[in-house]
Image (tube, rainbow, N blue to C red):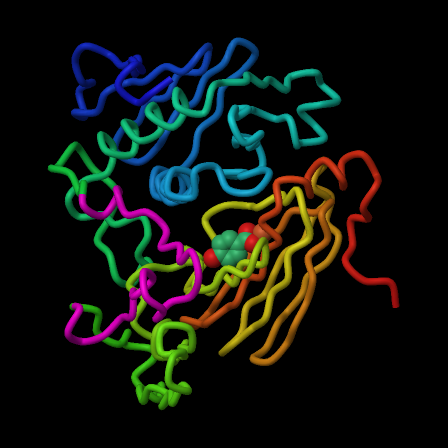
Amino acid sequence: MTATDIEVVKSDSPNTEGYHQFQLGEFTFSRDEYFVYIAWPTGSHMMSVDAFLRALQRDVAWDFFYGIVNFDGVFGTVNHYGTVDVFAGRYNDSYRKAELDYSENHETPAIRETFKSILADWTNSTFDPFASPHETGAAWGVKNGDNISAVTRRRVAAARMVGVPGDEQIRSDESGMPVNRMFLDVDQSEPVVEPEPGFEGEVAAFNLFSYLSRSDVTWNPSVVSACKDSLFCPTTEEYILPIIHGNDRVEWFIQLSDQITWDVEDRDTGAVRSRVTMKAGDVCAMPADIRHQGYSPKRSMLLVWENGSSDVPELIASGKAPTYPVEF
Ligand code: PHB
Ligand code: FE
């Protein structure tokens, strides 16, 4: 299936607030000035439109990410890398016990195109779902233009390392990426690299702190280096991670600056497991059977280290690999 084969199902005309209604399988999606309404055969749900669009933006830009993207405690997606489940209440103990949970599996292109269309239609010109709340206008109100350039950003993914030939995505004043207001104290000098003759294309270094200080988005890891399946995905964070991430593998967090507090819950039920406060220099591993959401009071720098191997989810799900990374 290619994007052009896909027919996004949407209402012929907009509602009184100016927004279209969308349908994917038996799910319907609509919005008004403040809220998003999601309905499925056994129930319905509402979310604040800003929170919904921030979550939707990440699900689209990350192409459904690793494992589960919970938009909140009820609605979300599970990535099966080729198909995606759209669910309501599936990872919510109360919905499960009441047998009100509901899930549908869709080919990735179908959900991708539907979600992209919703994001484009429901995001007004004033709102950037990737920006920190302090650096964007409001999501509210009747339809007021669009922000297509903002909502079609994809995550930056180096195939080797930022700065080496082919991956030259260095951020600078010249490339129109100024230092963020909260990172004005970050040293901007670049390392001096002196490779032996013949190795000029092989040896590279860049100032990661400078690179991150110029990020104009929040909670959007970019891949800055790839060594086989080992992916370094640093990101700048401010306010709240707009999704609750239920991983299908272990991931490591290295807090590079400032502080993030993580709420950690059981991945399947949502039961509280712990609260982790990470200060600059702290390192932790998030197990593969939890879900987490981060809170960053100041703009901070976080390095997320992922094992991108497509074998890992099955190894963990079948019990061949543990849900935790190290035996002490
Ligand atoms: C995560 O779910 O692990 C995650 C997602 C986005 C971020 C940071 C961490 O910016
Ligand atoms: Fe995560």
Q: Is residue 328 above or below residue 118?
A: below
At x 41%, y 87%, the residue is: 196
In the depicted view, which residue is nearer to us: 54 or 109? 109
- Identify the residue at image location x=18%, y=18%: 14
Check residue 300 for magenta coloring.
no
Give the dominant element type of the magenta stretch: helix, strand or loop. Answer: loop
Percent x, y of residue 255: 56, 73
Determine whether 162 is above or below 88 in the image. below
Q: Quadrant of the C terminus?
A: bottom right
Q: Quadrant of the N terminus?
A: top left
x, y (%) of residue 169?
Answer: 29, 65
**In the image, is residue 162 part of the stretch drawn in magenta?**
yes
- Magenta range is 149-175
Residue 208 at x, y = what percent?
41, 76
* Residue 322 x, y percent position in the rendering: 82, 48
Q: As displayed, is residue 149 above or below residue 213?
A: above
**Which residue reaches farthest left?**
145
| Vertical comparison of 32 with 205: above or below | above
Quadrant of the rendered image containing residue 132: bottom left
Q: Residue 135 versus residue 16: which sits nearer the camera? A: 135
Confirm whether residue 21 shows in the render: yes
